[in-house]
């Protein structure tokens, strides 16, 4: 049931008797007419679409231009923090040395440059001098008019190939064209290059800088603020800093002028600088890696034309986990920006330097018009598609995770694993990883060492949010819509979400559930209003696919629970599935977990490794069905560890042996030998596997495994090669003809005439014999036989 529209700024709701009432939105919120939701006023026009109305008709505001970074006295510490103006607030923190009996150094007078306001903060314990902040002064300066084009005598002004520079974002903004000054007569003596005010001089070719009349360009300096006038407190000397910073305003620092006290200790003479110049590789150049104010320069290598790898400390949230997260329409970039984009046929992340790998999301539609999305991972010209059903397409064939793990076991370029309801692709050659779940949510990581080398819809990774909307051509997008369009690729047409009024009302009813118990314990960590808009779109699209309301609600709310438990692991959400009727059925031996934090499950392959085999995922959650405590994963099933049979010994050919510890050797004696048995000093063995070596050819002479005998309890099983190229099976000297055979102590399976497998389940022994290559395989569980076997197969440890 839907009520008629209310008055301006009012929200309708239903009474207990299905009556309609209108009430004003709470203070600090504003009504979203499209979905009847009161949204915080601070979320309107903030660049993130929280409801269909909050980013409509928003005024365009220019990106604030901040004054240059101030510098504190040499014995002060400069600290910065974000502010609502967009420009950081800087604090000069005095030293915290406790008072001594010596004469304290006089405190300089607090001074901030022009363009900053002085603000005192409380002094900390043992601090000698006042602490103060230099806060940027808000500016509304309009851009100055374009100056006339001027060139010195002997030069003539010409238009450059570039289009110039634009002040502002609208069509009526000030346009100042760039121009270049070319010498009228190359043989004449020309004055040095000179450009008018608000233009900077750029030598077109660094090789011609020593020419008598070098060609140069006058490029507009784009700024909407005035550089602060450099100044230092009394008793301090101003020194300019020269570095690679492209800021408009010159950096400087203030050095305290001190007079050394009289002392009997001679002042040591500084040691001469030891200049060590590195040998750079092809495509690299030398640069000074330490500050130019240091007495001795240090040099390193970097890519030609690229900024050096940053060594500055990043915020804790970036250092902790550099990941791009895509949950529905919500993008969290590598640098932490939050964007609202509908992903469909887009490049998510790619190698910016060499284009050796990229990750994209693609749309694929069938003949009936039904569409699905899949994740495409390309590395070194090999293509892998991660499908919604968690299968993988490789070389145009579809595989399950288990199948591709077997196929790629000898491939060192990538690994694939499944964790709960998600599949993870790990590149071994480029070190990135991709995680994709059944709800088509994506995580991309492993780019910590790839600053300035990765960009896409996940942002330009520089540890700086300001350049996240970098387009493929290197320019910044003005809007999120322009940014998304710039990274579009070819693919089947994507259907726009057209949520009809009835589905929108249902979606709101299902999504608003997160505002009640037990989800209130998450509200201080995951803001409901920000989640709600994505939930509405997700549920609406889910309903249009023909799924039930319960399925759509559980899918969306499950994502909110996952985000909550990542932010607050101790949140009390145990009863959320009962409250929302979101029941999940798992297979035998499995239990459902909302937040599984290990990087992998315990499996038959890693059961003997320590806890480091599956380290914690750094707080990240994966939901789904996992093996119950005490069980391990074996293919698609959960089994006790003793059913793994992960110890494997093999023999084949001339004959060659591969021991339980994977040691290779050749042993071609003519006799019967114990391949494997349990260790028992008294000779009372639970089992023995004996191989028979016989001559299988005279010219050249070859020795082969012609039979395998299993001794268990009072029983004997013989697997032997017959003259007609088939395997003969004798159990307690009785011939076995029909397969499979299931006895109370033995199971026999014949895969074909040339291969037979025998399994004794009570001791978890499996033996396979094949006459195709005169080979055999012995499998045992490590949990039962670790350090407890002997024979040609050795001891497993």
Image: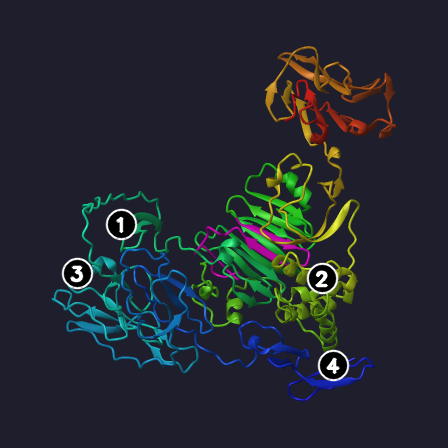
Badge 3 marks a residue whose secondary structure is loop
Q: Earlier in the sequence, mark 3 or mark 2?
A: 3
**For residue 10, which quarter of the picture?**
bottom right
Alpha carbon distance from label 2 to label 1? 58 Å
Residue that label 4 marks: 13
Residue that label 2 marks: 555
Alpha carbon distance from label 4 to label 2? 26 Å
Q: Are marks 1 and 3 in contact (CB under 8 Å)?
A: no
Badge 2 marks a residue whose secondary structure is helix
Return the residue nearer the eye: 319 or 737: 319
Residue that label 3 marks: 211
Q: Earlier in the sequence, mark 3 or mark 4?
A: 4
Alpha carbon distance from label 1 to label 3? 30 Å
Q: What's the coloring here?
A: rainbow
Q: Earlier in the sequence, mark 2 or mark 1?
A: 1
Q: Earlier in the sequence, mark 4 or mark 2?
A: 4
Q: Is residue 743 magenta?
A: no
Q: Who's the residue at 65% across and 21% down the image?
A: 794
Alpha carbon distance from label 1 to label 4? 70 Å
Location of residue 491 in the rendering, given as x and y in whole percent from the top left corner: 59, 62
Badge 1 marks a residue whose secondary structure is loop
Location of residue 365 in the rendering, given as x and y in whole percent from the top left corner: 67, 61
Q: Which residues are magenta?
A: 432-461
**Magenta part, dominant SS:** loop
User: Mark 3 or mark 4: which is in front?
Assistant: 4
**Does residue 406 appear anywhere in the picture?**
yes
Q: Quadrant of the C terminus?
A: top right
């Amino acid at each position: 049931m839907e009520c008629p529209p209310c008055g301006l700024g009012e929200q309708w709701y239903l009474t207990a008797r299905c009556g309609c009432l209108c009430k004003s939105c709470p203070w600090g919120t504003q009504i979203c007419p499209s979905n009847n939701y009161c949204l915080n006023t601070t979320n309107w026009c903030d660049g993130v679409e929280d409801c269909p109305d909050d980013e409509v008709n928003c005024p365009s505001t220019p990106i604030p231009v901040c004054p240059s970074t101030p510098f504190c006295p040499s014995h002060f510490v400069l600290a910065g923090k974000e502010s609502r103006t967009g420009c950081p607030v800087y604090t000069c923190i005095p030293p915290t040395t406790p008072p001594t009996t010596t004469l304290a150094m006089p405190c300089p007078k607090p001074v901030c440059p022009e363009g900053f306001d002085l603000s005192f903060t409380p002094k900390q314990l043992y601090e000698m001098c006042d602490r103060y902040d230099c806060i940027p002064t808000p500016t509304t300066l309009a851009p100055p008019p374009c100056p006339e084009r001027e060139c010195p005598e002997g030069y003539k002004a010409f238009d450059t190939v570039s289009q110039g520079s634009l002040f502002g974002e609208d069509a009526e903004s000030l346009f100042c064209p760039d121009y270049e000054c070319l010498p009228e007569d190359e043989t004449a003596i020309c004055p040095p290059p000179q450009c008018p005010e608000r233009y900077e001089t750029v030598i077109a070719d660094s090789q011609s800088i020593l020419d008598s009349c070098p060609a140069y360009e006058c490029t507009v300096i784009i700024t909407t603020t005035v550089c602060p006038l450099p100044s230092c407190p009394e008793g301090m000397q101003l020194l300019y800093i020269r570095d690679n910073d492209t800021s408009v305003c010159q950096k400087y620092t203030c050095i305290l002028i001190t007079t050394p006290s009289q002392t009997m200790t001679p002042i040591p003479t500084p040691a001469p600088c030891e200049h060590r110049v590195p040998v750079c590789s092809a495509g690299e150049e030398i640069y000074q890696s330490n500050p130019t104010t240091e007495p001795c320069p240090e040099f390193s290598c970097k890519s030609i034309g690229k900024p050096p790898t940053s060594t500055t400390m990043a915020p804790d949230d970036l250092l902790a986990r550099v990941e791009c997260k895509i949950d529905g329409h919500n993008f969290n970039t590598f640098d932490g920006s939050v964007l609202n984009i509908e992903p469909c046929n887009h490049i998510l992340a790619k190698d910016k330097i060499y284009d050796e790998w990229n990750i994209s999301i693609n749309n694929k539609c069938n003949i009936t018009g039904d569409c699905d999305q899949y994740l495409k991972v390309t590395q070194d010209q090999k293509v892998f598609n991660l499908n919604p059903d968690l299968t993988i397409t490789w070389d145009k064939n579809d595989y399950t995770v288990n199948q591709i793990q077997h196929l790629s076991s000898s491939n060192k370029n990538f690994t694939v694993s499944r964790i709960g309801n998600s599949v993870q692709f790990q590149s071994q050659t480029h070190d990135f990883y991709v995680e994709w779940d059944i709800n088509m949510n994506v995580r991309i990581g492993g780019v910590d060492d790839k600053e300035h080398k990765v960009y896409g819809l996940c942002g330009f990774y520089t540890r700086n949010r300001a350049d996240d909307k970098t387009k493929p051509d290197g320019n910044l997008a003005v809007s999120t819509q322009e940014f998304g369009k710039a990274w579009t690729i070819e693919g089947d047409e994507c259907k726009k979400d057209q949520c009809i009024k009835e589905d929108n009302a249902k979606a709101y009813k299902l999504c608003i559930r997160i505002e009640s118990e037990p989800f209130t314990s998450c509200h201080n960590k995951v803001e409901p209003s920000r989640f709600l808009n994505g939930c509405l779109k997700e549920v609406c699209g889910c309903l249009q696919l023909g799924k039930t309301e319960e399925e759509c609600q559980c899918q969306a709310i499950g994502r909110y629970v996952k985000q909550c438990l990542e932010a607050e692991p101790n949140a009390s959400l145990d009863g959320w599935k009962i409250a929302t009727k979101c029941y999940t059925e798992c297979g035998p031996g499995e239990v459902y977990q909302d937040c599984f934090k290990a990087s992998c499950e315990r499996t038959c392959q890693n059961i003997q490794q320590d806890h480091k085999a599956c380290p914690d995922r750094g707080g990240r959650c994966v939901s789904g069905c996992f093996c119950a405590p005490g069980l391990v994963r074996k293919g698609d099933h959960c089994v006790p560890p003793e059913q793994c049979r992960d110890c494997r010994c093999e023999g084949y050919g001339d004959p060659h042996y591969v021991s339980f510890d994977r040691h290779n050797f050749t042993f071609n004696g003519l006799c019967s030998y114990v391949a494997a048995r349990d260790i028992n000093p008294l000779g009372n063995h639970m089992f023995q596997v004996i191989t028979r070596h016989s001559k299988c050819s005279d010219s050249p002479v070859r020795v082969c495994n012609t039979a395998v005998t299993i001794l268990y309890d009072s029983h004997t099983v013989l697997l032997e090669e017959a003259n007609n190229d088939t395997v003969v099976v004798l159990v307690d000297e009785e011939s076995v003809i029909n397969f499979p055979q299931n006895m109370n102590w033995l199971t026999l399976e014949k895969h074909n005439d040339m291969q037979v497998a025998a399994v004794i389940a009570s001791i978890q022994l499996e033996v396979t014999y094949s006459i195709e290559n005169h080979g055999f395989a012995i499998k045992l569980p490590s949990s039962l036989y670790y350090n407890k076997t002997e024979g040609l197969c050795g001891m497993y440890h």
